[in-house]
Amino acid sequence: MSNSNRTNSTRKIAINGMMIALVFLATYVTKIPTAVGPFNLGDSVIIIAAVLLGRKSGSLAGAIGSAIADIAMGYQHFAPVTFVVKGLEGFVAGFIVYALSKRFKEKKHVVILVASVAASIVMVSGYFFAELYVMRLFDETMGIAAALRDLPVNLVQGGACAVVGYILSVALDRFKVTKFIAN
């Protein structure tokens, strides 16, 4: 392995580690208690990671950073679901940006908007179906009542994070932040 490849590999590991930490911090620090669990802005950082760094980094940052935040906040029973849902959220956002950016180069802000909304839909629907079917296997208080109870908070969080993630991603894209990260 050449020195250049090692440097790039080390840089990718460091950047992914920073994005994981940022997702954790955004989730943990912005948590606002609600009757059904905390509202937070961590999903906005997942969107930013996916838009700037791609589907793999978005997926890693979302899965690991969010699951660690769940554990730190005392929601260990949700950590495996969070790992899958938030990882998928980051992957979908990154995939959409990757798939559509070259085709709609002049409308990248629209691509980022579509990716942000799709990521939020993945998060909301992922938790809804996890509470409806998966979590019910381990906790009898889960099921349709819990899924419907949590839906409004998840919708508000998803919408807020889509807006914040979109605005910050577009701003960072316009300032060509990915050129600084990649080089």
Image (cartoon, rainbow, N blue to C red):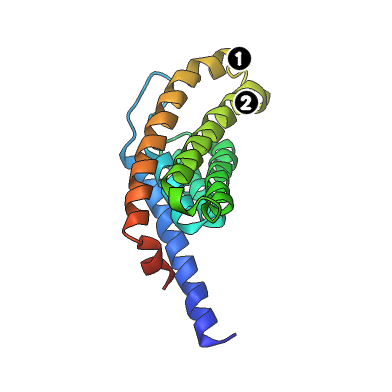
Q: In the rendered structure, find residue 182 and report the number of the disc placed on it.
A: none
Residue 50 image point, x, y percent = 49, 51
From the viewer's side, name the closer residue of 31 and 170: 170
From the viewer's side, name the closer residue of 61 and 117: 117
Q: In the rendered structure, find residue 129 and report the number of the disc placed on it.
A: 2
Numbered disc 2: secondary structure: helix
Residue 112 image point, x, y percent = 45, 45
Q: Is residue 51 left or right of residue 31?
A: right
Residue 40 image point, x, y percent = 37, 34
Establish if 114 lies above or below 3. Answer: above
Which badge, 2 or 1, is on the more N-terminal residue? Answer: 2
Numbered disc 1: secondary structure: helix
Residue 138 seen from this side: yes
User: How many other residues sit within 10 Å of disc 2, few (<14), some (14-19) or many (≥20)?
Assistant: some
Residue with the mark numbered 1: 144
Establish if 50 lies above or below 35. Answer: below
Residue 66 image point, x, y percent = 47, 43
The residue most toward the front is 106
The structure residue drawn at horizontal position 34% and vertical position 34%, both measured from the top left corner, is 31
Counting every numbered tag in the picture gives 2
From the viewer's side, name the closer residue of 81 and 97: 97
For the N terminus, the quadrant is bottom right
Amino acid under label 1? Ile
The residue most toward the top is 145
User: How many other residues sit within 10 Å of disc 1, few (<14), some (14-19) or many (≥20)?
Assistant: some
Q: CA distance from mark 2 to mark 1?
A: 9 Å
Residue 27 seen from this side: no
